[in-house]
Image (cartoon, helix red, strand yellow):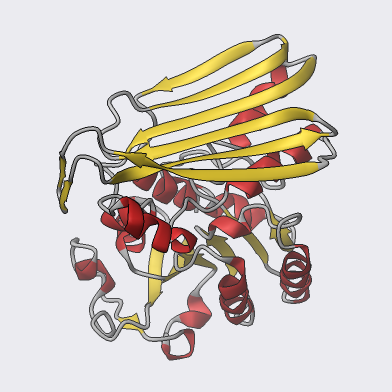
Amino acid sequence: MINVIQLGLGPIGQRLTRYLFEREGIQIVGAVDPDPQKVKKDVGEHADIKALGVSISPNLDSCAAIRQADVAIISTVSFLEKMEVQIREVADYGLDIVSTCEELSHPWKTHPECAHRINDYCKEKDISCVGTGVNPGFLMDYLPSVLTSVCREVKHIKVERIQDARPRRKPFRDKIGAGLTGTEFEENRGAIRHVGLPESVHMIAEAMNWKLSEVSETMHPVFAEKTISMDSGKVQEGDVAGVRQVARGYQSDSEVITLVFKAAVGIEESHDSIHIIGSPTFTSTIDGGINGDIATSAIIVNAIRSISRAAPGLKTMLDITAPAYFSGVNA
């Protein structure tokens, strides 16, 4: 039995509750969210399943079963600066950590000082910690790295994640600016983007043992060519439907990694494609793409066994045993 505490009970946190509940050998013993409208609610009922007898607490210190827990699942923030404080609080209770924090997925080059502090603190507290998800954490970094296992030589890796945002949760659509006018998009540009592409570039580079001279990222709005309906309203013709971001990694003047992320409501043919140029050269495509909300929650649950087996410290997906679906935890 693995006892789990959840931190963060928004849309992804609620989905995680459902996925954790259905997995044999995993038990939710605590739940934390500071939102006063969630505090004291049963975590199962909050996730639209049966009552689990676990009330949502406002913080870790008020979580009655904290000493029974083995692993903390953190689905709260995307940015490492805010995440560091939460990691320290959880580490003080001796819990291993699996998190959806995008910048935690591979922070060694993007936030080196913070990454080293987290790594040192985790080692001091004898716990292991990993940030993962569908992207970053799998589709645009870990999976292409694994696919190069069959290569004699690799010269260039290009990944394209093209997805219709209509099936995704509303916070995701908000994050990509769906429904904003062009002016509103520019006014809020600092808050609109998919987080994690530079981290994915650096993860691939680490796997390839490539020393990059430069990493760049660009972002542009995708405009709706017609009015598009979604469950939270409509995107009018000419307004922003989503974003197209491209991250590139260079060795000297040569582009060796290209990551293309396009998410917008109304995309007709979603797909995830990985192009490897080398020996052999090949393309692997997932027609229809992978639903990010399902996949992120699933990989978090599937990574629990892997992080429980890992040595203390801050890990990436390259460091832990490959997560795989498991029907239950062996007694």
Identify the residue shown where x is 60% and y is 79%.
85
12 on left or right of 189: left
In the image, residue 264 above or below residue 304: above
In the image, residue 64 above or below residue 46: below
Q: From the top left corner, tell me how far across and down residue 30 is, in percent.
A: 40, 75
16 on left or right of 331: left
In the image, residue 253 above or below residue 126: above
Q: From the top left corner, tell me how far across and down residue 205 is, in percent.
A: 75, 38
Q: From the top left corner, tell me how far across and down residue 101 is, in percent.
A: 53, 60
Q: From the top left corner, tell me how far across and down residue 260 is, in percent.
A: 53, 33
Relative depth, front residue between 44 and 100:
100
98 on left or right of 192: right
Identify the residue shown where x is 46% and y is 32%.
161
Residue lying furthest front: 183
Relative depth, front residue between 262 and 302:
262
Residue lying furthest bottom: 62
Whether residue 38 is visible: yes
